[in-house]
Image (cartoon, rainbow, N blue to C red):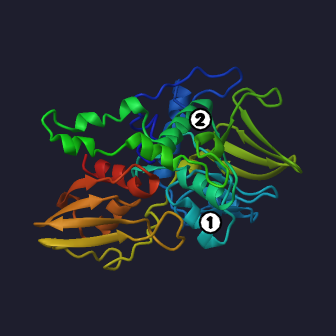
Amino acid sequence: SSIASMSLFGPRMSYAVRPAPSPGAAASHAPTSAKDLLAMVQRGRKRAQYNSRVDSEELAALTGNGAVTLLPRGGVHVRTRHGPVQFGIPPETIKDSLQLGLDVPKVYVVGKERFNLKFGTNTAEFEFPAYWNFFIKGDKTTVVCAAAAAAVIRQVMEEVLEGPAEEHLHQDDEYSPFVDDSIYAARPDLLREIGYFKEPRNGRKIEADTLLQFVEFACSEELPAGHFLARMAFDDGTIEVIDRGAEYDVIVDDELVATVPDWLSSAIADPPHILMPMATAVGDAIDFEAPQFGITVLGAADGFTAAGTTAGFILWMRGRGILVDPPAHSAHYLRRNGISSRKITHVILTHCHADHDAGTFQKILLEQ
């Protein structure tokens, strides 16, 4: 869920608990010194200026060896002989791989910032890559990150798959003490519904530990101080990701395959990649007249359809819009089509999964 996965640079789940780091674990990515704060600011500046569709020496050097692809929605896809590794996980990222004819990665490196403030977008959307690898490929998704990020991501995935804990359902509180007995007796059994969706599929139990496995960055005697290592072993070799501060090295079987700037793992190109068709040419937006009653469809696809935007729409009533399940960058799309954000007065989320809530915070941040 986009909403639940925000942490250091946005809201956190109200009852999430940050555990003490394990011995040898990499330090948290929260800035703890002037040097860390400066590095965070520099990453933010580079993200703000980023456009993957404009040539630059840095990006040309990164993609020059043919192993690296800058994905349209954001993220960096690195091909290796043991399967691809992706840095950054913006919404709908698996659709980029599918459209470009790339293998959908099973290994994802979570950036130091897990939220792009400029576009109000989660860049650690591990939910649908995990579904793809579990339901389509029958395998786990490996998440490479700091220990603190792993704790948050695991808790988010548990809630996404299992729903809130029973004490957080507050189901009976939704009914007045004066409600008719027959209505109260007919209320849904949420725990039973949650249990149904958790039932094993093809003999595999659906829970966080069967969909995700974590590899945490840790100190290593092989590396200088301030560098952190994540190592993944395969039957025929290894992939190592080394966090050198401003860059990540991807080393496959002791051979350097790519060096990825750390800011790219949470960068989204400006303007963002939008699949929804435009009503006007870019820069030639009309003054949209909201109907008294009507619907504007923003997307009509599911989370796995490569060529479509996930489902969402605007319900217009008396010239005001209710944004339902906003797709990623829908607020940017509306602005480019001459639809003022002030005409959208409400947002409805049917539920907090990434294919339904990805554009929510972008809408909220535009109103500030």
Between residue 262 and residue 156, name the one nearer to us.
156
Name the amino acid, label 1.
Answer: Ser
Question: Residue visible at 32% across and 71% down?
Answer: 297
The residue singled out by tag 2 in the image is: 150
Between residue 117 and residue 13, name the one nearer to us.
13
Tags 1 and 2 touching, CB below 8 Å? no
Asked if one can make out residue 14 in the rendered structure from this viewpoint, the answer is no
- Which of pointers 1 and 2 lies earlier in the amino acid sequence? 1
Q: Position of residue 23 (x, y in %)?
A: 70, 20
Secondary structure state at the residue bearing disc 2 = helix
C-alpha separation, residue under disc 1 versus residue under disc 2: 24 Å
The residue singled out by tag 1 in the image is: 97
Q: Position of residue 139 (x, y in %)?
A: 70, 53
Q: Position of residue 128 (x, y in %)?
A: 55, 55
Q: Give residue 225's quadrant in the image.
A: top right
Q: Position of residue 217 (x, y in %)?
A: 69, 34
* Left or right: 145, with 166 as reference point: right
